Amino acid sequence: MDQLALLFVLLLGALVTVPLGDRLGLPSPVLMTLGGIALALLPFVPNVDIAPEFILPLLLPPLLYASAQRTSWRQFAANRRPIFLLAVALVFVTTAAVAAVADAIVPGISLAAAVALGALVAPPDPVAATAVAGSLGLPRRVVSILEGEGLFNDVTAIVLYHVAIAAAVSGSFSVPRAVGALVLSAVVAVAVGLALGWAAKRLMDILGDATLQIGLTLLVPFVSYVLAEEFKGSGVLAVLTTALFLAEYATDADDVLGRLAGHTFWEVVDTLVTGAAFGLVGLELHNALATASGRWGEMLGIGAVVVVVVVGVRLLWLLPAAWLARKLHKRRDVDEEVLMSWRETVVMWWSGMRGVASVALALAIPLERDDGSAFPARDEILFIAFAVIIATLVVQGLTLPWLVRRLAVRADSDVDRELERKLAVRAAKAAKRRLLEIEEKEDLPEDLTEVLTRRAYDVGARISPEMVDEERREAHARRVERLRTIQRVQAEMLSAARHEVLAARSEPGADPEVVDRVLRHLDIRSLRGG
């Protein structure tokens, strides 16, 4: 098997593990990691030949962009305190704890190398957290905090990692320089992200065509990442800034087909890249196995200690932080619904899985220092990093669904339905207001006005039938049933039309371009309900 065949196997696995995970009740990223581990143990499967410095630029931008598209600035602002405590403060605390332990128990490691180890295992993976926790029906506030933590903790960890690696390679370290690098990285990233987001929005307006616009969104995250890195900024933060800017300001409410096509496109990209990324995590196991040759007992012992530190520090940080948040909020008379219970806190703790970023950072550790000597304890760092990744991703990923069921942590469906009802009312009122504005400008026939008024009302009723009273609900149900019959028959009519046009494609003298254009017209009519 060559490298290209291995890539296709990973992409196929990315698709197959989604329905398989649904049937087994297990997260697909975890199944892909297990599949990658199984492939790594087969003698005919080659080692992955990807330069470590290319792993993050190739995998992180599309994954971060897809994740950021599902959230908003306001959601981050609403959860800014817990996200800051997890994505910044906890990363520093975990890095310091792991560095202290590694410095004490890993033979031959320098303090700077120990800090690099701490930084690369500190951040939970944003894709793992979203893919695993998001499929378990958790409360929205928990998922939002996990997404925010996962999206922003790489910014802190990667900067810490680069500072530590530079110190380990050169043998010198400056606190002011490290702080300056962190601040400069953030400022440059935000500036690049905003500038590129603004430029991308203007270019989308010029392109016009949905196909070209979607193609541009595929390029934007890579350009944002590489451009920020060129100017010594955080590529991760730049991608997030660009994605959030476009989600906020480049969305056209009337571009229905473009939005549906774009959503489908990014669902496909997200599924394929996520699967390939976690398959790669499993395949890189051979690196860890090679470093532990002949020293299994010692290496497993050190790896287990660091795993306990990483998992334990998260718990010891979350429990008092949640308790303190409840105390402070009680003094301010904040609604209890916005606070996390101890059960949700435990789920947050167990959701701290490491993944793609940790793998890439571990593999990117240089072989030598500036003076030509070997990088201190590089083999040990690689093994420990993979021990943490496998233990958190596989063990926690496989047991998280059981833990969620055991603790009975689930989303409040009543809250979701109430929000849905309110949005349905707002949508119906907006439609009715627009109808009244049109009536003032145009002389609409009375029967047409009556039909349009009913349809304006139906806009909300179709979204949330609970918004109407019983009598109107029955009338609406009758109209819906009649409409469904019309749509069903019309769908069969359009299906017959599509089959006839498609059959003409193979007839002598038929121009495929003309046939496809007519077929696209019928497809659009079908999508719009006729």
Image (spheres, rainbow, N blue to C red):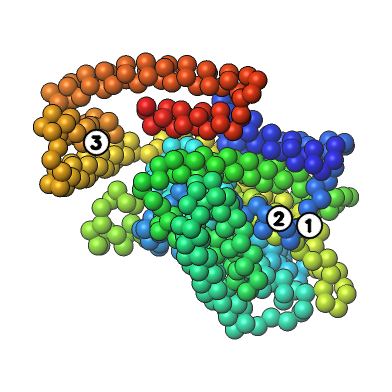
| Residue 254: % across, % down | 36, 46
Q: Residues within 10 Å of mark 1 (few under 14, many from 20)?
A: few
User: Which amino acid type is marked by label 3?
Assistant: Gly
Q: Position of residue 192 (x, y in %)?
A: 54, 69
Q: Amino acid at mark 2?
A: Ile
Please give left or right for residue 347 compared with residue 163 in the image: left
Q: Nearer the viewer, residue 68 or 194?
A: 194
Residue sitting at x 25%, y 42%: 427
Which residue bears the numbered disc 1?
51
Which residue occupies 19% across, 33% down? 452
First in residue order: circle 3 vs circle 1: 1
Is 506 placed above or below 263 here? Answer: above
Query: Which one is in front in this view, the residue at disc 3 or the one at disc 1?
Result: 3
What x and y, as percent, mark residue 17?
A: 63, 32
Is the C-beta separation of discs 3 and 2 under 8 Å? Answer: no
Q: Marks 1 and 2: CB-CB under 8 Å?
A: yes
Q: Which residue is mark 2?
A: 55
- Which residue is identified by label 3? 460
Whether residue 342 is visible, yes or no, is: no
Q: Nearer the viewer, mark 3 or mark 2?
A: 3
Name the N-terminal-most of marks 3 and 2: 2
* The one of 275 and 348 positioned closer to us in this rendering: 275
Q: Residue at the spot x=61%, y=62% of the render?
A: 223
When the figure is inspected, residue 195 is found, relative to residue 200, above or below; the finding is below
For the residues marked 3 and 2, what is the alpha-carbon distance in whole angstroms? 46 Å
